[in-house]
Image: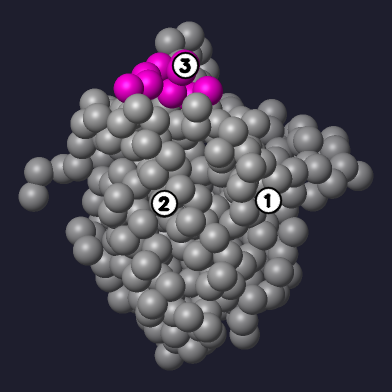
Amino acid sequence: MSAKTKFLMLLIPALALFSAAADAPAPFTLHQVGPGVWAAIDNPAAKAARAGANAGFVIGSDGVLVVDTFENPAAAQELLNQIRQKTNLPIRFVVNTHYHLDHVAGNNIFAAAGATILAQQNVRAWERTENKKFFGTKITPEQTAMIESLALPSITYQDGIQLYLGTRQVIIRSLPGHTGGDSAVFIPDANVVFFGDLFWNHTLPNLIDASTKPWIETLDIGIQNHPDATFVPGHGEVGRVQDVKDFRGYLSDLRADVAQAQAAGKSGDALTDAVLPELQQKYGSWDAFAYFAKPDIHYTDQELQGKKRIPQPLAQ
């Protein structure tokens, strides 16, 4: 059975579920963030075919560029439908901001529509391998088949690339922090930055692959270079530079609190118990706090000790 056939077998039930739930909340909401630039923001109220992350698209004079493709093919199909309501120009490019499943699971939808998929070179290496860890040790054959059928980037870059949608320029830069294969997408004429999971707007991040020191430096670059931009995060609502500063503050405080607990001789659950109230006081109202606070402390503890396992980049 070909990878394409396996993908279609997995996609058809998802599309049927989405169709049956036509009256349910939409998987995402569209926000125009600039002329011809749209952010598709995950709708937590959606139950069927939830987007699971943010995405977006840019309409140029001769085509469309899509940023990320959600965690569900049915949500990606709905994004394609929404694009088609706004333009009949060809879908020329998809940029995957990193390899995580919630940003690439709809790749096949756009590849079938004729798009060329681009990403930092590590995304191609990790998309069908590292994503398996999110299903744990009891990953099913169906889940394995789904991951192994994901459409990979056919064009990769190390540091970045510039694209043109006719007269419209799109600047893509690889920046470290969240996974080791992250990209930010900047549309100069609209002053919009799609920051992917390098920015979580008032939402605690997933640090499973993170290196927080260079991540803070990446956020500094965004803050300094784009003080007046609109920032589309990987998770959370569309934000401004102050929201990026707030997120930087979370990573900085997390590192400082964990380091202080380590210096006091704490480890394991005792370290988590010492750090958690400090984070709760400042960030307890943020989305996903209950889900990610303890893992964030654990991963940062490992990182500061030099014991954290992170995906290894391709040899240069």
The tag earlier along the polypeptide, 3 or 2, is: 2
Neighbours of disc 1 within 10 Å: few (<14), some (14-19), many (20+) = many
Q: Which residue is mark 2?
A: 252
Q: Is residue 52 above or below residue 78?
A: above
Q: Which residue is mark 1?
A: 42
In the shown orientation, is residue 298 left or right of residue 47?
left
Q: Residue furthest front?
A: 264
Q: Is residue 251 above or below residue 268?
A: below
Helix or strand or loop: what does disc 2 sit on?
A: helix
Helix or strand or loop: what does disc 1 sit on?
A: strand
Mark 1 is on which residue type?
Asp
Mark 2 is on which residue type?
Ser
Q: Position of residue 210 (x, y in %)?
A: 35, 41
Label 1 vs label 2: CA separation?
26 Å
Label 3 vs label 1: CA separation?
33 Å
Q: Residue furthest right?
A: 23
Helix or strand or loop: what does disc 3 sit on?
A: helix
**Label placed on residue 262:** none
Is residue 267 inside the magenta stretch? yes
Q: Position of residue 254 (x, y in %)?
A: 45, 43
Instruction: Tell me the residue at 34%/47% (across/down).
Output: 212
Q: Which residue is mark 3?
A: 269
Label 3 vs label 2: CA separation?
21 Å
Q: Are marks 3 and 2 in contact (CB under 8 Å)?
A: no
In the shown orientation, is residue 300 left or right of residue 205?
left
Q: Which range of residues does the magenta coloring cover?
A: 265-273
The quarter of the picture where residue 47 lies is top right
Quadrant where the N terminus is found in the figure = top left
Whether residue 306 is visible here, answered yes or no, is: yes
Marks 1, 2: nearer the viewer: 2
In the shown orientation, is residue 74 left or right of residue 186?
right
